[in-house]
Amino acid sequence: MANYPKIGIRPTIDGRYGGVRESLEDQTYGMAENAAKFLSENLKYPNGSPVECVISDGCIGGIAEAAECAEKFQRENVGVSLTVDPLLVLWRRNNGSNAARSKSRLGL
């Protein structure tokens, strides 16, 4: 079986606790799950199998969570990442540290 690269999905949110972050957690992670479902249903590898997606273990609201996600993506052979964010405000601060990995952004 081929070891094709996977699509990594990074759900990012405003990291401030005390109501802001908590109000966005479910919505943002749901966006990541919906994106993974859509991509897997509509994209195929050259052998015809569905593209595999890897979602961060939780929402990313700071540097430590972004680093954990980067480590997971490295282990899981992620070749491209998609960042989902309901507010589109975190791109500069939180866009990942791997310059070799292509990045994309989705906000709804």
Image (cartoon, helix red, strand yellow):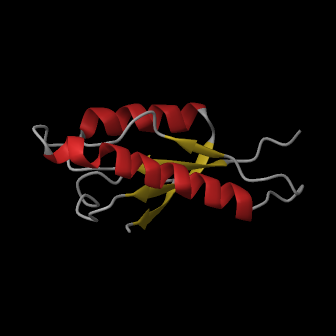
Q: Give the left or right position of residue 32, taking residue 78 as reference.
A: left
- Residue displayed at 25% across by 60% down: 92
| In the foreground, 93 or 31 | 31
Which quadrant, please, contains the N terminus? top right
Q: Give the left or right position of residue 21, taking residue 56 as reference.
A: left
Residue 76 x, y percent position in the rendering: 61, 35
Residue 23 x, y percent position in the rendering: 23, 46
Residue 96 visible in the current orientation = no
Query: Relative to residue 20, is residue 56 depicted above or below?
Result: above
Query: Relative to residue 73, is residue 80 depicted above or below?
Result: below
Residue 26 x, y percent position in the rendering: 36, 44
Residue 103 x, y percent position in the rendering: 47, 60
- Residue displayed at 58% across by 42% down: 54
Q: How many marks?
A: 0
Which quadrant, please, contains the C terminus? bottom left
| In the foreground, 48 or 34 | 34
| In the foreground, 7 or 87 | 87
